[in-house]
Image (cartoon, rainbow, N blue to C red):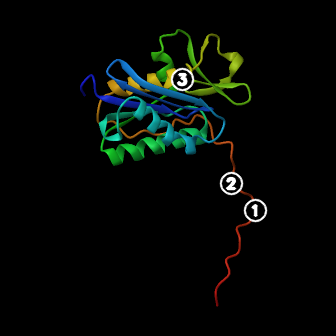
Amino acid sequence: MASDDLVLGFDTSAAHCAAALLAGDRVLAWRAEEMGRGQAERLMPLLGAVLAEGGATWRDLARIGVGIGPGNFTGIRIAVAAARGLALSLEIPAIGVSTFDAIRASGGTGTPAVPAPRGMVHVATPALVPAESVADPLGPPTPACLAQLIAKLAQVAPEGGPPPAPLYLRPADAAPARDAPPVILDDA
């Protein structure tokens, strides 16, 4: 991949929707929006805006980088599905980047730790542990910086890897309905 090839990186693994467009070492455009819900509706317009701001089109992209978590179950699924669909339609590679790898690439020291519900954190062992049990936690960067790090890591990733897949370290909070399924009436 040429150093100036365009890479689009994005993430929706937490209460945000973030994207960055890179050409080599230059960040051409980025956007980040804090949101607890609505990433599915907001992601594609946000990606389109980042491309437009960077003076690029979908066909100009050489690669896509996507945050695979850990984090919000639904948010991760949204980003990974979008990345895989875009990669297939554009015939370019999509590279999954864990939040742990992005934290490590940010240059800080300490244990990469991603906040989880109920006073817990995800750590890179991988495990879900109480927040107070991590001696020197190093949390994720801002959403805008996270998207840029995802794009940079995708840019240097080897080609030919598997498609991005969610990194889940705990089961989803949602549970199947306990009600009996509805009775289907026959037309006869």
Q: Amino acid at mark 1?
A: Asp
Mark on residue 124? 3
Circle 3 SS class: loop
Q: Amino acid at mark 2?
A: Pro
Residue 177 image point, x, y percent:
72, 57
Bin the neighbour count of mark 2 within 10 Å (Cα to Cα): few under 14, some 14-19, many 20 and up. Answer: few
Circle 2 SS class: loop
Q: Vertical placement of 48 versus 112: above or below?
A: below
Residue 176 image point, x, y percent:
68, 54
| Mark 2, residue position | 176
Q: Identify the image quadrant of the N terminus.
A: top left
Q: Amino acid at mark 3?
A: Ala
Q: Is residue 71 left or right of residue 81?
A: right
Pick the residue in front: 160 or 129: 160
Q: Quadrant of residue 51?
A: top left
Upstream in sequence: badge 2 or badge 3: 3
For image coordinates 68% across by 16% down, the residue present is: 133
Q: Vertical placement of 31 versus 90: above or below?
A: above
Extreme left residue here?
2
Residue 172 image point, x, y percent:
64, 42
Question: Can the viewer see residue 46 in this picture?
Answer: yes
Alpha carbon separation for disc pair 1 and 3 = 38 Å
Q: Quadrant of residue 130?
A: top right
